Image: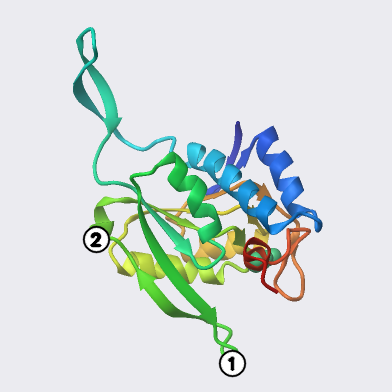
Amino acid sequence: MTRTDQDGLTVIDHPLIRHKLTIMRRTGTSSAQFRQLLREISLLLAYEVTRDLPLEDVEIETPLAITQKKQLSGKKPCFVSIMRAGDGLLQGLLDLVPSARVGHVGLYRDHDTLQPVKYYFKMPHGLDERHVLVVDPMLATGNSAAAAISLVKEAGATNIRFLCLVAAPEGVKALRDAHPDVPIFTAALDEGLNEKGYIMPGLGDVGDRLFGTK
Ligand code: URA
């Protein structure tokens, strides 16, 4: 696993992630394969994003001895899905951290103002004491991610990271401008946005591909 960190952006690079992402990008990939691959990649990404979770000492008894070892300290981390595509990332994250809490943010884009509007918001208690990871597979314009993170901050979170699968440079800039305190992690940084706001070359509409809708 190699990481390229620059100005709050970490690209998590690994041959397995690249290979799986290439299959996801192909038009012929079925929804079932797409979902499974996203689950597998999100598990690999979660491994890297959780690398510096704090630990504490714990005394345990093995069949042979009493010993001091480490365990995660503090409140359980919280994964926040930006619906609906964010839900595709949740499964792999929860495979790795089954005890994590999960929050959901639902946003739609107002046709007149083009701004994200909240239609659903549910968070676990004690957000201020949790490591919060906001997830959405595609960081395109950055508007939804920035709005979701503002809501999560209003709900009390102070320690926030953002995880996506593919980012566009425009989205990275917008999110860094709006929330310079929130580090961004991605599996790939693509070329940019097309006129409809899709990431190029990207992988199309992730929600539709995940759930077989059109
Ligand atoms: N959302 C998607 O699902 N795909 C994109 O390319 C951009 C936003």
Q: Report whether residue 161 is seen.
A: yes
Q: Label 2: few (<14), some or many (≥20) within 10 Å? A: few
Identify residue for label 1: 112
Q: Label 1: few (<14), some or many (≥20) within 10 Å? A: few
Residue 58 pos. (x, y %) = 20, 25
In the visual, does 75 lie left or right of 165?
Answer: left
C-alpha separation, residue under disc 1 versus residue under disc 2: 34 Å
Snapshot colouring: rainbow
The secondary element bearing badge 2 is classed as loop
Question: Which residue ends up furthest to the front in the rendered image?
Answer: 32
In the visual, does 210 lie left or right of 123?
Answer: right
Residue lying at 24% horizontally and 42% vertically, measured from the top left: 74
Q: Quadrant of ligand 1?
A: bottom right
Q: Nearer the viewer, mark 1 or mark 2?
A: 2
Residue lying at 57% horizontally and 64% vertically, measured from the top left: 85
Residue lying at 36% horizontally and 65% vertically, measured from the top left: 152
Task: Give 175 or 13, whichever is nearer the viewer.
Answer: 13
Identify residue for label 2: 125
Residue 47 pos. (x, y %) = 49, 37
Quarter of the image where the N terminus is located: top right
Q: Report whether residue 163 is seen.
A: no
